[in-house]
Amino acid sequence: MTEKMHCSEPWDSRFRVEKLSFLNDKKQMVLSRRESPMEPTKPKLPREAIELYNDFIHGEISRRAFMEGIQRLAGGLAAATVINALMPNYALGQQVSRTDDRIKATYETVPCPKGNGNIKGYLVRPVSADTRSETITKLPGVIVIHENRGLNPHIEDIARRFALANFMAFAPDGLTSLGGYPGDDYKGGQMFNKIDKSKMSEDMVAAAMWLKARPDCTGKIGATGFCYGGSTANMLAARLGGDLAAAAPFYGGPPDPEDIPKIKAAILVHHGELDTRLAATWPAYDQALNAAQVPHEAYIYQGAGHGFNCDATPERYNKAAADLAWQRTIDWFNKYVRG
C-alpha cells in the first residue's frame, strides 16, 4: 500500500512542506511553491468575488444574487469588468488545438440502457499510435469527466492533452439526453440540474466500460474529472472495482463510506487548500482507503482554490498547482494504467 503526501525524490528545492490546521496526521501535508504561482493576466480580484462565482456556477446562488454580490464587491472596478474576468475564456485556456495534426478526434455515441439511453462523447487518440505499423496500437484509456456544466471546450482540451501523453481519452457529455453541452456554461449548469443524477451515473459507467472494451484499448483504463467529474471518478472506482485501474479526482467528493471497500483502483486525490469544504473530506477518505488496503496518495495545494486546474478561468487558475497536479496524474496513470 502506498501513501505519500510529500515530493517524490529527488527533493525539489522549489517546494516546501507545511501542515494544514485541520489535518492532524503528520503524513497529510501540503506542497507549496515559493515563487508566485502564476503570472496574472487580468486585475486580481477579491477572494470573495471568486467564491461568489463558485457559488453561482454550482447553483448555490441565483444569477441575480451573483450580479448583486459582484456589484457590492467591485469597488473601483466596473462590475462588468469583474464579471468578465471571472467568466471562462476557452480560447485563452486551450493548450492543444482541435486541428492539431498529432491527434485524431471523433465524437462517438455509447449505448446506456440503464441510464438515459445513450451518451455522446469526445474520443481522442494520438495519430502516431495508428500510423507506426499496419495494425492499430492498443493504448491505455482515460475517461475524462466534466464539471457540472457539460462537455465544454476545456474538458475536450484536457482529453487532447491525454492523447499527447500517449493515452486514448474519452470525454463523455452528461448533458447528451438534453441535446448536449449548449455552448454556454450558465445554460449548461441549468441543464445539468434537470437530469436525473442516478441515470447520469449509469451513463458514465457505460462510457467507461465502452472505452475499456474497445479493440484499440489495452483493456486497462483510468478515470479523472473535476468537481462533479472528480466525484464521479471516485464513484467509478467504487462501482467498477477491478475494471478500473486508477482514478485521479480533482476537487471531488469521496464515495459513500459503505462503497469505499469495493475500490480496487489506485487513487490519487487533488484538492486546493482554499477549497476547505472538499479538502476537509480527505482525512476520512484516507482512513477508509487505508482500511481497504487501496494504494493511494493525496495532495492539497497551498494557495489553490476550487477549480485551480482550469486555465480557462484565470482568476481561479493556479499554474504551479495545476502543472504539478497534471504531472502527478500522468505519472500515476503511467504507473497503474499503462504499467
Image (tube, grey):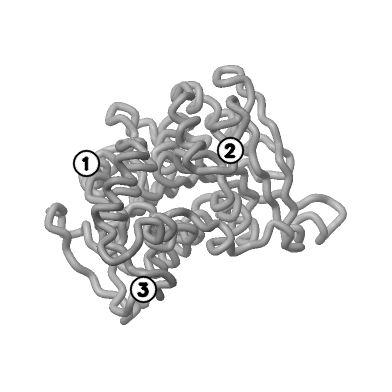
Going by the numbered disc 2, the residue's amino acid type is: Tyr
Residue 2 shows in this picture: no
- Which mark identifies residue 181? 2
- The residue closer to the viewer here, 234 or 183, is 183
- Which mark identifies residue 95? none
- Which mark identifies residue 284? 1
Can you say whether 305 is above or below 116 in the image?
Answer: below
Q: Is residue 95 left or right of residue 85?
A: right
Going by the numbered disc 3, the residue's amino acid type is: Glu
- The residue closer to the viewer here, 56 or 285, is 56
The residue shown at (46%, 24%) is 194
Can you say whether 112 is above or below 71 in the image?
Answer: above
Q: Give the alpha-carbon distance from disc 1 to disc 2, as whole Å.
A: 34 Å
Q: Give the alpha-carbon distance from disc 3 to disc 1, as whole Å.
A: 27 Å
Going by the numbered disc 1, the residue's amino acid type is: Ala
- Which mark identifies residue 9? 3
